[in-house]
Amino acid sequence: MRPKFVSPKIFLWIIHFRHSLLWVYNWYLRRFYGMKLAPDVRVSLKARIDKTNPQAVEVGPETLIAFDSIILSHDFSTERYSGGSEYGTRIGSRCFIGCASIIMPGVTIGDQCIVAAGSVVTKDVPAYSIVAGNPAKVIRSGIRTQPFGRLVQSTKPTTNTVLQPDNQVAEPVQ
């Protein structure tokens, strides 16, 4: 959906500029903070990734981290900040981290997962699942996602049944 007051050429330039800015921000996080981010990860400029222990953050390819998300990798109260790999926060490939969600330190999110907006992830998330809530719980599993966590609708074969007016199932349609 493009604004009507902007020409298509200017609109495409704005989109290209935005993608370039996100790529530079990703490069900056990898180069100067040492975060293990795949080159094609999209991190919102308003997302907050822990810079106290940045080497413990690992994000897989084709993952999107939305605005106001917080990804923590240290916990001073339990002394999990020394850079040990066993306490790292890991996010798999093709994931979507919703806006204002919080990923606690030491959590592993599997491949092709969706974290709903406002969720607080305190435990590991199995691959191919959707989590939501505070604390986050699995609400659906066995999903597939496209790049950047876009949900692929399942193509399960459905039977061609017809409902009668009194909500009783009739014979399958041939």
Image (spheres, rainbow, N blue to C red):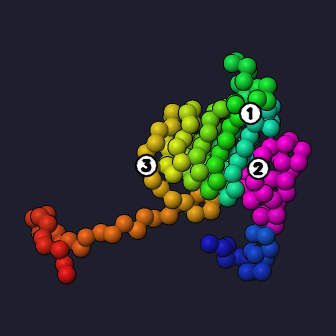
- Kindly identify the amino acid type of the residue bearing the numbered disc 3: Arg
Can the viewer see residue 116 in this picture? no
Q: Nearer the viewer, mark 2 or mark 1?
A: 1
Can the viewer see residue 68 in this picture? yes
Whether the magenta-drawn stretch holds residue 41 is answered as yes
Residue 114, how many percent across, how many down?
Answer: 55, 50
Of pointers 3 and 2, the one earlier in the residue sequence: 2
Which residue is identified by label 1? 85
Residue 37 marker = 2
Residue 97 marker = none
Instruction: Classify mark 1: helix, strand or loop.
Output: helix
Residue 140 marker = 3
Left or right of 102? Residue 166 is left
Q: Which residues are magenta?
A: 17-43
Of pointers 2 and 1, the one earlier in the residue sequence: 2
Instruction: Classify mark 3: helix, strand or loop.
Output: strand
Quadrant of the frame with the C terminus? bottom left
Magenta segment, prevailing SS (helix, strand or loop):
helix
- Kindly identify the amino acid type of the residue bearing the numbered disc 1: Ser
Image quadrant of residue 88? top right
Mark 3 touches mark 2? (CB < 8 Å): no
